[in-house]
Image (spheres, coloured by chain):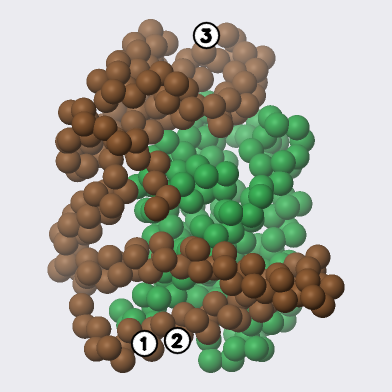
Amino acid sequence: MDTKSIVYIALFAALTAALGLMPPVSFAGLALPPITAQSLGVMLAGAVAGARRGGLALLLFVVLVAVGLPLLAGGRGGFGVLAGTSGGFILAWPLCAALIGYLVSKAPGAGFAMTAVSIALGGIVLMYAIGIPWMAFVGKLGLAKSLTIMVAYVPGDLVKVVLATIIVRGLRRAYPNL
Amino acid sequence: MLDLYAPGTSILHRMSPGPKMLALMVGATALFLNQSLVVTLAALIVVLGLYRLAQLTMKQAWQQLRPLLWIFVLFFALQWWFSGVTLAAYVVLRLAALILLASLVTLTTRSSDMIDTMTWALGVLRPLGVNPAKIGLAISLALRFIPVLAQITQDVREAQKARGLERSVIAVAMPVAIRTLKMADDISDAIDSRGYRP
């Protein structure tokens, strides 16, 4: 692997961590985990760095969290978080970034809507497809109930998809040799 | 820098990270396979005993669970409502034991030691084309980039504030993204020009 790929992998792992420094938005009281900006890092890693680099960047991020660095929003980290109820969402991130990178690279000249759909497929559909069964299994909650809880997160994730799409399209114009 | 490690000299602190991580994996799997409330409760007590052994206070154990308290309450209420109080207690106790066990590994092991162990273990993958030295470089770069990214965001935000644009997410995010990519390219050129060949 060339040096540029290594630096990009490190950069997007760090970006996801840095997004965790943004104050999380609490909603619906305190009963639910807060919405964080970190999944924006997943979307950008896939869409900007590509499937391989993006996927490896998030894999690196997950490894750093697993070894105990408090890189998740709110200063959480360690095996405990990954083994907990929302661990599936975090463990899904490398796959999500890889899928987004693959879909985006398949259609290089795609318009706004197509890019947004690619990002949403990896950043929402795949993430929920892994995270929700995990939540249902670890919490012995049942799929239907877990699904109901996660509906609250869809609006925030849609905002992130739009934001990621705007940034990616702007970056491609400002920085053509990506 | 940022590390959840709690310094100490107990036997758990002195153990090498490899066996601890293996023990965690085995313990977590066992907790999931077991269906009995009594065994789960016993496991929780054993884990708390291990905290004692590691010279950690019960307050430190409590701190691991406190951020998740609301999730526990939510899960307990949902389980109680749908499946009865026994299952509710079982689920919440299992989750608590799992998180305490995992946090115990984190609390008694330095991140740098864990990274070293993982880099060493990744040497097994060398025949598949994995180069542990490159992974080591990626880890160090990532940890260095986090404060740099925070600094760049701060700079851009101040610059946009002077233009009255600090409330616009795009006006801040776009320059930050371009600047960081440019920085990444410069760094990779700098590494290459120094003849880095791991």
Instruction: Give the amino acid type for the residue marked by disc 2 in the picture.
Output: Asp
What is the number of callouts on the image?
3
Instruction: Measure the C-alpha gap from mark 1 to mark 3.
Output: 61 Å
Instruction: Give the amino acid type for the residue marked by disc 3 in the picture.
Output: Thr
Q: Residue at x 58, y 54 (%)?
A: A21
The quadrant of the picture occupied by the C terminus of chain B is bottom left
Label 2 CA crowd tier, 10 Å (few <14, some 14–19, many 20+): some
Query: Which of the two labelled residues, at mark 1 and mark 3, occupies the earlier sequence position?
Result: 3
Q: Secondary structure at mark 2?
A: helix
Pair 2/3: label in front: 2
- According to the picture, the residue beneath numbered tag 1 turns out to be B190
- According to the picture, the residue beneath numbered tag 3 turns out to be B86
- A160 on left or right of A108: right
Query: Which of the two labelled residues, at mark 2 and mark 3, occupies the earlier sequence position?
Result: 3
Q: Secondary structure at mark 3?
A: helix
Which color has been applied to chain B in this rendered view?
A: brown
Which color has been applied to chain A in this rendered view?
A: green
Instruction: Measure the C-alpha gap from mark 2 to mark 3.
Output: 59 Å
The chain ID associated with circle 3 is B
The chain ID associated with circle 1 is B
Q: Residue at x 16, y 61 (%)?
A: B123
- According to the picture, the residue beneath numbered tag 2 turns out to be B186
Q: Are marks 1 and 2 in contact (CB under 8 Å)?
A: yes
Instruction: Give the amino acid type for the residue marked by disc 1 in the picture.
Output: Ala
